[in-house]
Image: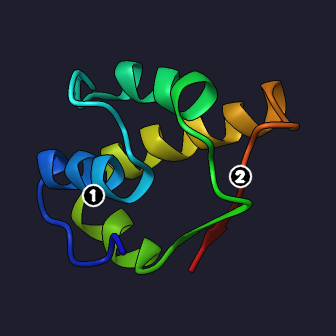
Amino acid sequence: MVGDVLKVDELHQRFTSALGFPDFYGKNWDAFWYPIVVLVEMPHVLRLEGWQELVQHLPCEAALMKECLERMQRDFPEHAATVEYA
């Protein structure tokens, strides 16, 4: 899902499509927080295929995304997806 992404805009577009983010989604990590905890029903498991490749291509973006997902799991465990970094 994410291993072939080379640009941050493309990464946000993948999440928009895969998780059904609204059209007004701001496509940045501050904006990412709101849909994952309020607007969309997260899947039980969010499997991020190609994680290591993403970390190599976009290390800062991967770290920010992981931080958001870990915060979601910590702050909203009843709503949070189990994230698999594959």
Q: Nearer the viewer, residue 61 or 80?
A: 80
As measured in the structure, the alpha-carbon distance from the residue carrying label 2 to the one carrying label 1 is 17 Å
State the residue position of label 2: 81
Return the x and y of residue 71 as percentages of the image width and height: 69, 31
Tell me if mark 1 has few (under 14), some (14-19) or many (20+) residues whose alpha carbon lies within 10 angstroms of its own: some
Q: Which residue lies furthest to the right in this view?
A: 78
Task: Decide if residue 45 is on the left or right side of residue 67.
Answer: right
**Residue 10: quadrant of the picture:** bottom left
Q: Residue at x 80, y 24 (%)?
A: 75
- Under tag 1, what secondary structure? helix
Q: Nearer the viewer, residue 65 or 31?
A: 31
Q: Nearer the viewer, residue 10 or 39?
A: 39
Q: Is residue 25 above or below residue 51?
A: above
Q: Tell whether 16 sits left or right of 41.
A: left
Q: Name the residue under label 1.
A: 14
Query: What residue is at 80 percent from the left and 28 percent from the top?
Result: 76
Image quadrant of residue 22?
Answer: top left
Q: Residue at x 57, y 37 (%)?
A: 67
State the image coordinates of residue 23 (x, y, percent, origin top left): 21, 30
Q: Mark 1 belongs to which amino acid?
A: Arg
User: Which of the two labelled residues, at mark 2 and mark 1, occupies the earlier sequence position?
Assistant: 1
Numbered disc 2: secondary structure: loop
> Left or right: 84 with respect to 30?
right
Picture coordinates of residue 35, whole percent (x, y): 48, 28
Q: Residue at x 41, y 30 (%)?
A: 32
Rate crowding at label 2 as few (under 14), some (14 to 19) or many (20 or more) other CA atoms within 10 Å: many
In which quadrant of the rendered image does the C terminus lie? bottom right
- The amino acid at mark 2 is Ala
